[in-house]
Image: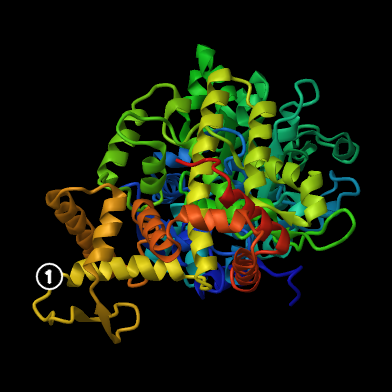
Amino acid sequence: MTAKNETLRQHLAAVKAGERVFENAFQGIIRMILEPGFEKVVVNGKTTYDFNIFRTGRKHTIGMYDEINSFVSFVKDAAEGGSSKEMAFVLVGEPGNGKTFFVEFLCGKYRNFLQGRNRKYSFRFLNMDQLGNYGRIREVDSETYEDPMILAMNLFDDPEESRRFIGEQGFSDAEIETLYRNYRPLGASTGYILNEIRQYHDNDIEKVLESIAILPVPMSESLGTLTGKYPAKDKITSSAVDLLGEESIQRLLHLSDTNNPYRFDLRRGALARVAGGGIHFSDEIFKNKKDLVQVYLGVIQNRAIEIDGYKWPIDSMIIATSNNSEFNRFLAEKEEAPIVDRCRICYVSHNTNYRMQEGLTAYAIGSESKTTLTKEVLHQDPNLNYAASVGVVLTRLPRSEKLTPIETMKLAAGEVAGEKSIKALAEVIDTLGQEPDITKRFGQRGLGHRSLGRSIQILKESSETNEGRCMVAYDVFRSLERVVLDYVVEPNERAKYLEDLKTGKKLYRERIMTEMFNAYMDEPFAIKKDVQNYVNMIIGIDAENLGPDRMWKYKDPQTGELKALKIDERYVKSVEERIGLKTEEQRASFRTSIRKIYGQKISVDPSYDFMDNLELVKAVTDVRLKSDIAGAGSLIGALANRTNEENQKLYDRMIVTMLGKLGYCRTCAQKTIEYFCTQEDES
């Protein structure tokens, strides 16, 4: 048999055999999310779950842990018949923090999921012209893409007969009970037509079934079936028709019975197209005018499309987004409380983890190879992503007496911040969480993804970038400042962001010190090795098996090999002096803290390298520069004053290393050395 004329019995047999599925929208979505599995992760000091489905694909969601967890528990509760099934899920937040991207990503995944066994089916009534009062209308589809199983449950006037019919197809009583948990009546038009067909065939069930064909729901994204987006339109042209549908003049020309609910064309509206187990996405829901929001009120609570007293039950998940300012304006109008009452509001913050931000910054920079206006290849400074990520993340972190911006940034990325523990950050987040003004909470304010995109555009269009054929990292701070000055309206915020960008420059400066040392040592990971050596020395300094030659044997956690290390106490002490530890007690407590971190981190992550401990990295860099070249000052001197041959050779050698091993091009290598030689942004 062709799929076109597949019968209801065949469909029921396929469901019974497990080749097809009958479930509501929430059950389908939660199955899609949980089947690929999840991991436990610690974010800002709290254990949370990371669902694999949101982390797959070329351009997937990054971060958003709390928001995704809220969403998953909302869908799970609805799938289990909880109160969420009568609610909409609304993401509220600042512009450019990924709300719409998240929903569209979810819809894309859901469309891919509804293939094969999970495909949605609906039905069509055939030979309508036989009935006599449908004019030239020969076939009628279910307006709301109802599932054939819903048709089977409503096939007879007597519910018991319908149960008996389903039982005859091989379903046990327990299975029928499970199916009936998702029972809903047929929509007005489908119910009316089915009744007419029954009367025409004098309740001969075989003939009634011959008039019904089962067909798959069309999956084309552009039709808006199964996943549909309704954007907030302008106040004049938008109306309830866009959501619910309206009377169709075309159909009225054919229908002789003017009471027939089929005269309403529901697919003119956005809801009917996703009513068969789909996702309805309402973008900027509170920007709609009041009467549309009132329409949503009924749809969310009753899960039905109602026109002129006729009802079409729908099965769809309603998810929406809204801007903070729009939402606050809406809340201020007290009479609108009932709609907010029916929404699960989830406040979406900006991403505050600068390590993860590097992934988002890569999206903003773009994956295609870049060219200048003259079609020459445009190089990317290896520190560009770091500089941009640190810059924008610092603007998103609120000020606090307990933590400096750098400490907050490091703790939010799960890194070490001196003596400060993750508990301090958790306390700051909890305290800010008590703020009634949402925008004052952690991560709610700051430069969003669009601002970052703008700054990259400004960087690309500048003449320096085009002339030098390179996007130099330091220049991104200038373009971020431009964005702050041009797009941030509130003076206090603007001042804070500019201050944060200065802090970002200091961090960039420290990164450059490390890079210069690596270039000087002619090795990409020179500084990393020295940091590792310091850590290993303070672990081995009190070992019992230390001989007079101060050699210590230890097992490398990364490779498992036995290694020997000479413990150089002068080196250890100089590093500690650079950190500012003068007394024995201070040194002992610092060493204990490093050993503690080593014990905690290495067991979980053997490749942990202490490079996130800025204080330690900076001290090691300074000590090595000092001992190797009699002070960083003289390296700066040597690079700045290239009149003698020795200095020129050193400069050339470093440029060669930067080009060959560290991923620089000639422009960014020269600019980076130039910046290193200035006293700018010295902390």
Residue 45, x across and y down, in percent: 30, 48
Residue drawn at 32 percent across, 34 percent down: 428
Rendered position, 380 above or below 240 = below
Residue drawn at 51 percent across, 27 percent down: 496
Q: Is residue 23 visible?
A: no
**Would you say 420 lies left or right of 488 here?**
left
Rendered position, 495 above or below 269 = above
Residue 281, x across and y down, in percent: 63, 42
Residue 278, x across and y down, in percent: 61, 51
**Would you say 185 lies left or right of 476 here?**
left
Residue drawn at 60 percent across, 58 percent down: 639
Rendered position, 25 above or below 168 = above
Callout 1: helix, strand or loop?
Answer: loop
> Can you tell which quarter of the image residue 493 is in?
top right
Which residue is outermost to the bottom? 561
**Would you say 474 lies left or right of 91 here?**
right
Q: What residue type is labelled 1?
A: Asp
Q: Which one is in front, 597 or 326?
A: 597
Which residue is outermost to the front? 644
Question: Which residue is labeled 1 in the image?
Answer: 542
Where's the N terminus, which quadrant?
bottom right
Q: Which one is in front, 236 or 370?
A: 370
Which color scheme is applied? rainbow
Q: Can residue 573 be seen in this view?
A: yes
Where's the C terminus, which quadrant?
top left
